[in-house]
Image (spheres, grey):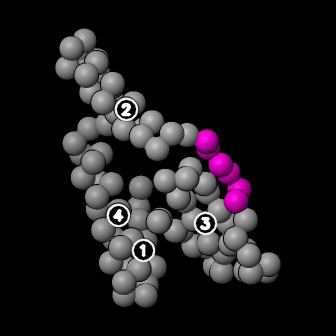
Amino acid sequence: MPELSHELDYLRWNGMTGEVALYAAGTKKWRVRYRHPNKRYDSYLAEWEHFMACVTEHDTRAVTGEDGVRVIQIIESARNEAFSGGQASVVI
């Protein structure tokens, strides 16, 4: 589950439940800040529909291969830092 931290507060996103929660250092509790009620596979269905439109109707891709490579680099940086106990620094 991805987590971003700022000082002593943490933001956590759960892609399975569609919840974004905030852990505030002052309260020492997780609070759901946003909830998107969705079906588990809605995003994958939308991706496939877009892919098929690109193939059959020659629509413009929403995401390029370069975008995908950059996302993998960001994920790997965050994962490596999480395992080493550091903080990932990402330039977007």
Q: CA distance from mark 3 to mark 2?
A: 27 Å
Q: CA distance from mark 1 to mark 4?
A: 9 Å
Task: Identify residue type, mark 1.
Answer: Ala
Mark 3 Cα shell of 10 Å, populated few (<14), some (14-19), many (≥20): some
Q: Secondary structure at mark 4?
A: helix
Q: Secondary structure at mark 3?
A: strand
Q: Are marks 1 and 4 in contact (CB under 8 Å)?
A: no
Task: Identify residue type, mark 4.
Answer: Ile
Q: Earlier in the sequence, mark 2 or mark 4?
A: 2
**Residue 11: mark in rendering:** 3
Q: Earlier in the sequence, mark 1 or mark 2?
A: 2
Q: Secondary structure at mark 2?
A: helix
Judged left or right of residue 30, residue 88 is left
Give the position of the C terminus as an image quadrant. Answer: bottom left
Mark 1 Cα shell of 10 Å, populated few (<14), some (14-19), many (≥20): some
**Overall secondary structure of the magenta stretch?**
strand
Q: CA distance from mark 3 to mark 4?
A: 16 Å
Residue position for label 4: 75
Total tally of numbered discs in the picture: 4
Q: CA distance from mark 3 to mark 1?
A: 14 Å
Residue position for label 2: 45
Q: Secondary structure at mark 1?
A: loop
Tell which residue pokes out farthest to the right in this image. Answer: 27
Task: Identify residue type, mark 2.
Answer: Leu
The correct choice, above or below, for 84 with respect to 42 in the image is below
Mark 2 Cα shell of 10 Å, populated few (<14), some (14-19), many (≥20): few
Q: Residue 69: horizontal and vertical position, in percent?
A: 24, 52
